[in-house]
Amino acid sequence: METWAHGQDVADALGAVRAPSDRLRHVVRIGVRARDFAFAVRGLPAPGEEFRVEVLAPSGAVWTYGPEDAA
């Protein structure tokens, strides 16, 4: 995540365009896995319910995380 974010900062500063690629999947996965931590650092209990995330990748593939019947 850090490498991607700082790479984007450099591209923005130079006026370069970075074409999105399916390598973004790693950033998405970090975000999904960090959900409970995000609640914890705010002193909040993480929701007990399972959740599902669906992302349309730059290639057109669909990345899914979590069970189909989740919120």
Image: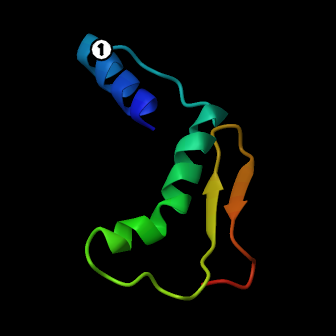
- Residue under the image location 49 percent in, 55 percent down: 31
In the rendered image, the vertical position of residue 32 relative to residue 51, given as above or below? above
**Measured along the vertical axis of the image, is residue 20 above or below residue 69?**
above
Horizontal placement of 36 versus 71: left or right? left
Q: Residue at x 47, y 60 (%)?
A: 34
Quadrant in which the N terminus is drawn = top left
At a point 69% along the width and 71% down the height, the residue shown is 66
> Does residue 29 appear to the left or right of 63 in the view shown?
left
Give the residue pinned by disc 1: 15
Quarter occupied by residue 6: top left
**Where does residue 5 sit, x and y in percent of width and height?**
38, 33
Task: Classify mark 1: residues with Cα within 10 Å, few (<14), some (14-19) or many (20+).
Answer: few
Total numbered badges shown on the rendered structure: 1
Place residue 21 in its image quadrant.
top right
User: Identity of the amino acid at label 1?
Assistant: Gly
Q: Position of residue 53 (x, y in %)?
A: 61, 66
Task: Depth check: give the residue in front, 13 or 48.
Answer: 48
Q: Pick whichever, 43 or 70, lies toward us.
A: 43
Q: Is residue 16 left or right of residue 55?
A: left
Tell me where residue 64 sits by quadrant: bottom right
Percent of width and height locating residue 68: 75, 78
Q: Nearer the viewer, residue 55 or 1?
A: 1
| Residue at position x 75%, y 47% in the image | 61
